[in-house]
């Protein structure tokens, strides 16, 4: 473990990294243009696998083990949200996100073909079904984290820089892209479920903005400000139908 933490400290000291770029992204690394600026992805690769939550846990362990500045990489709201994982707040917004996840899961299961769980060819953009599949659980997770952070500190909901606001911004992006992807699927659908899911997403987006009014203007590190320029990103070409989804936000 000590060797792992030393490796994490070495990796995190690279000035090319964008601090906390992984906090407010869509976690779809195959299509991300900031992979070489992201400590989370480097750490997952260095460990030979894992998930984003591993980084938070290992950062916390490294910070406890030393005083070398890793404390700056820790976000108390995220740690609290992780500690509360599995808790159901009974929050109406969280409930809507869970409802969307469950109904989308059933919709996807009813289609002829299962969507790919991950990108199998990252040189090509994902299809609409893959977008919906990828994001339906992530949306619930993002909303859980925003609600958890606001439960810990109600003032965070109206703070321009809080984790709750940033996470709500990420949730809005995920919801918006999902809505566009569902609209892409609607013409070929056998029933009104894509339209019904779009309506549910619109409710969720409206409630997110009501609860986190500064979320739309939150500036995500790397993506908004400070911004890594398009020339410095390594983004695959986007298809015309999905280009609006991935515009300059992923
Ligand atoms: S910033 Fe990019 S590379 Fe890092 S976790 Fe998010 S999607 Fe993956």
Image (tube, rainbow, N blue to C red):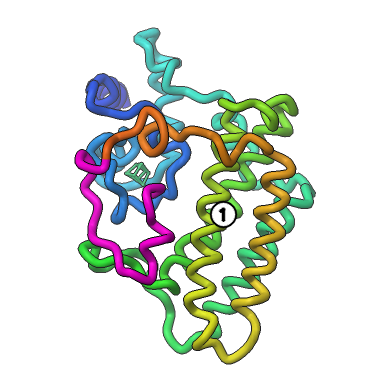
Q: Mark 1: few, some, or many residues within 10 Å (few <14, many ≥20)?
A: many
Q: Nearer the viewer, residue 88 or 249?
A: 249
Give the main secondary structure of the magenta stretch: loop
Residue 248 seen from this side = yes
| Residue of label 1 | 139
In the image, residue 191 above or below residue 51: below
Q: Which portion, as a residue range, is magenta?
A: 230-250
- Left or right of 163 in this view: 70: left
Determine the residue located farthest toward the bottom in the rendered image.
190
Determine if the magenta segment contains residue 243.
Answer: yes
Which of the 4 image quadrants contains residue 113? bottom left
Residue in view at x 73 percent, y 44 percent: 210
Relative vertical location of residue 142 with respect to residue 196 in this rendering, above or below: above
The x, y position of residue 187, in whole percent, is: 52, 85
Tell me residue 147's x, y (percent). Answer: 68, 40
Residue at image coords 71%, 28%: 152
Q: Is mark 1 within 8 Å of ligand 1?
A: no
Q: Is residue 83 visible?
A: no
Residue under the point 68% across and 56% down = 204
Q: Is residue 47 left or right of residue 196?
A: left
């Amino acid at each position: 473990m000590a060797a792992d933490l030393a490796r994490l400290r070495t990796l995190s000291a690279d000035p090319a990294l964008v601090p906390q770029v992984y906090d407010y992204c869509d976690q779809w690394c195959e299509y991300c243009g900031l992979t070489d600026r992201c400590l989370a992805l480097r750490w997952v690769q260095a460990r030979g696998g894992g998930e984003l939550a591993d980084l938070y846990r290992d950062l916390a362990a490294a910070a406890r083990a030393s005083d070398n500045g890793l404390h700056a990489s820790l976000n108390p709201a995220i740690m609290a949200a992780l500690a509360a994982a599995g808790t159901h707040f009974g929050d109406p917004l969280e409930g809507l996100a869970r409802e969307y996840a469950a109904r989308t899961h059933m919709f996807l299961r009813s289609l002829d073909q299962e969507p790919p769980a991950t990108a199998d060819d990252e040189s090509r953009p994902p299809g609409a079904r893959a977008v919906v599949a990828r994001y339906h659980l992530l949306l619930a997770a993002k909303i859980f984290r925003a609600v958890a952070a606001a439960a810990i500190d109600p003032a965070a909901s109206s703070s321009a820089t809080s984790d709750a606001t940033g996470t709500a911004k990420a949730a809005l992006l995920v919801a918006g892209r999902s809505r566009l992807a569902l609209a892409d699927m609607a013409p070929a659908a056998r029933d009104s479920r894509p339209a019904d899911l779009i309506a549910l997403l619109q409710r969720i987006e409206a409630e997110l903005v009501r609860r986190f009014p500064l979320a739309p203007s939150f500036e995500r590190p790397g993506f908004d400000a400070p911004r890594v320029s398009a020339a410095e990103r390594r983004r695959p070409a986007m298809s015309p139908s999905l280009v609006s989804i991935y515009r300059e936000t992923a």
